[in-house]
Image (cartoon, rainbow, N blue to C red):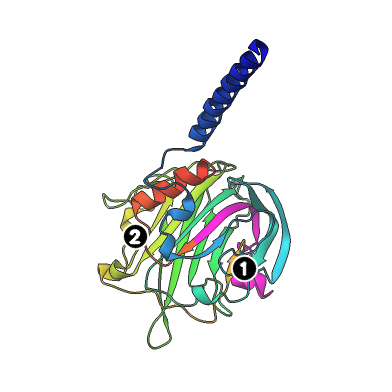
Amino acid sequence: MKTMKLSMKAMSLLLIGATIIACSDDDSKKLPPIGGYNSADEVAASALKAYWPLNGNGNEKISNTAPSSTVATTFVTGIKGQGANFNEGYLAYPTIAALSSTSGSASISCWAKISNTKLVPDGPSNISPIFSLTRTGEVFGNLNLFGETHGLTTSDSIQVKGIFRIKKEDGTEFGGDAVNMLKQEPWMDATHTWNPNKIGGQWAHIVYVYDGPTATNRLYVNGVKISNSAWEVRNGGDAFLLNHFTPTRPVIGALETVVNGTNTDTWNKALKGQVDEVRIYDKTLTQAEIGALYELEKAGR
């Protein structure tokens, strides 16, 4: 009887210990929010129109749309799970209905790992396309995001560029771009800002936003605004809402003329680099939302 009592006591102590350990494990899994969010999926969730996790395949997650064309693309370790690795390749998609209409503003959020393509002063230089929302027969689509060198020869400095094209009522276009100046040039006045942006060969979080009510476009890298302030505002700051040329389709890693085989520009090539966590929003992401996306995805959340 005494032995049984001791055994029961030992079992009780084991159960209490197991409960304490289990509680500790549960508590360790309850990570504190970042920017008020538990995961990147919660950021501007109602405005998210398309999302490519790129975890082992190229499917767009919300519409479950698979790529219609996959060129020189494999999947490797990314910033969050897996990401797409392009060897002068791309993922091209059919039209996705949610991306054909717009509220008048938009944001592209993604991670990219690209390198400077011009390594000697007189060498060739080409762009590194990350994302394009295309328009038929044109090099630049409705929205475009890529890296380029513009004569810079250091391998770690990347100039990032976002370009928009808006369909006007008469069918012609209104367009502009945002770009980061890598250094202060002699001709720059006090309205110009610059950012060395030394992200070559490493993962960087890149966001391009277009705000229709103010006709303003900006670029952010790793949560920090990098675009040249003098060139961010278009149309004198008066409203110019996005209106897409249709049909339009998304491409990751190339521009339209490369995909359709009509390209004749030496600077226009498919991507050599990696891309992960591509998200398209039907709104202008705020600085706080951009910062939260950066920190959450960097933490694998």
**From the viewer's perspective, is 240 left or right of 102?**
left
Q: Mark 1 vs mark 2: which is more N-terminal?
A: 1
* Residue at 31% from the left image edge and 51% from the top image edge: 192
Q: Which residue is mark 2?
A: 232
**From the viewer's perspective, is 91 left or right of 300?**
right
Task: Estimate the x, y position of residue 225 in percent, counting from the top left.
Answer: 37, 49
Magenta-colored span: 254-279
* Residue at 70% from the left image edge and 69% from the top image edge: 69
Q: Nearer the viewer, residue 123 or 283?
A: 283
Kindly report the distance in space between the C-alpha atoms of the residues bearing marks 1 and 2. 34 Å
Q: Is residue 244 magenta?
A: no
Task: Estimate the x, y position of residue 184 in percent, counting from the top left.
Answer: 37, 45
The residue at the far top in this view is: 2
What mark, if any, has residue 64 been given in the picture?
A: 1
**From the viewer's perspective, is 228 left or right of 270?**
left
* Residue at 44% from the left image edge and 54% from the top image edge: 42
Asked whether residue 75 is in view, the answer is yes
Quarter residue 166 falls in: bottom left
| Amino acid type, residue under disc 2 in the picture | Glu
Disc 1 crowd rating (10 Å Cα; few below 14, some 14-19, many 20+) is few
